[in-house]
Amino acid sequence: MIGTASPHALMSVVAQSPAAVAVHDKPRWLAIWAANHVIEDPVGSRPVVGGLLDRHSGERTTGALSRFWEAFIAANDIAFDVHHDFVSGNRVVRDVTIRTTLSSGATVQTPAHLLYELIEEDGEVRIRRMAAHWEVAPAFAQLIRPSFANVRGIIGSSWRMMRYLGIAGTAGLAGAVVSVGDRGKQVAVDLVTRAQHGDATATARLGGTVPDTLTKVIAAGDTVTASCTVNGSPAVLIVTMNRRTRRVIAVELFRDANRAYSRQLRAVGDRTA
């Protein structure tokens, strides 16, 4: 749990991730994560879990996190365009666009919503969980356009994943292609639309706060996220649902007055860090 940490303090910890990635400081990046951490990048893929026995080293170490760095961060450059930040309790949500430059020179732009959960550990605030909501298929589609840089980028990225993650880990990333999809997006849009038209059940499901027009709607795993506004102020909506039935299980709306913490950050990496 977080004790008296201010929103600014939480944002400062979150900002350390892209800052460390920007200068390829792997030890600094590893140090910001809690011992028992979870990285879902993207949501729906096989998560990176810390605190478990690492089969490669035979110890409970940051081995899996280190291999994540080597597979997705070490060889590439990325810029985070941070549009808005939201702080709620021990969680930070970032509305971003990620501009990735692979080692081959190929580039990819990825709209995303990043959710961080923080805890206090050994007297310091650290990241316990990071869930990166972005869609694999549109990102990959930018690399299949015929060009030498794109071909080299796909080959290089695939080689690093196989080397550091193995077949199972690489397959775990591919699993993120399957999500609640367009049908799930429509469920989220319909929920908001009904609330906008006065549906009491939909409004209650949204916690009594009805967002304005949804933009940047993303389906990842069992969730749909969307940028939106509430009374003219930026917000992010996260809808969790049953992946098979698209039944809505939980709805969260992130909005607060901490807009001063929004900033433009530049970082380096192949995936969101």
Image (cartoon, grey):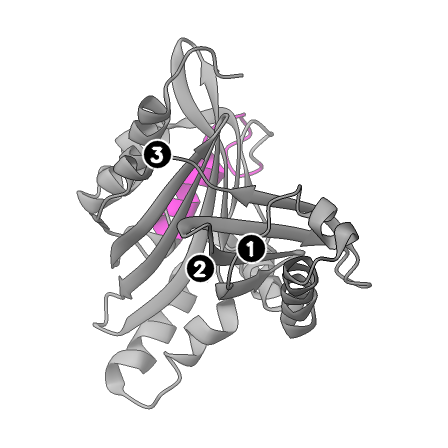
Q: Is residue 40 above or below residue 44?
A: above
Disc 2 packing (10 Å; few <14; some 14–19; many ≥20):
many
Q: CA distance from mark 3 to mark 1?
A: 37 Å
The structure residue drawn at horizontal position 46% and vertical position 41%, both measured from the top left corner, is: 255
Q: Which residue in the structure is indicated by mark 1? A: 169
Q: Nearer the viewer, mark 2 or mark 3?
A: 3
Say which amino acid is labelled 1.
Answer: Gly
Residue 225, image x, y percentages? 55, 56
Read off the residue under disc 3. Answer: 258
Q: Residue most toward the left?
A: 23
Q: Nearer the viewer, residue 179 or 158?
A: 179
Q: Residue at x 56, y 27 (%)?
A: 51
User: Label 3 sits on what residue type?
Assistant: Asn
Q: Any mark on residue 161, and which?
A: 2
Binning the other alpha carbons within 10 Å of mark 1 as few (below 14), some (14 to 19) or many (20 upward) gives some
Is residue 14 located in the magenta-colored stretch of the structure? no
Magenta stretch holds residue 58: yes
Query: Magenta stretch?
Result: 55-71
Give x and y (percent) for residue 53: 60, 30
- Three-letter amino acid code of the residue under disc 2: Met
Contact flag, marks 2 and 1 (Cβ < 8 Å): yes
Secondary structure at numbered mark 1: helix
Can residue 273 be seen at all in this image of the molecule? yes
Q: Is residue 178 visible?
A: no
Q: CA distance from mark 2 to mark 1?
A: 8 Å
**Label whose residue precedes the other's in the sequence (3 or 1):** 1
Depth check, front residue: 158 or 146: 146
Q: CA distance from mark 2 to mark 3?
A: 37 Å
Query: Which residue corresponds to the image point at 58% horizontal and 60% vertical from the top-left?
Result: 220
Mark 3, secondary structure of its residue = loop
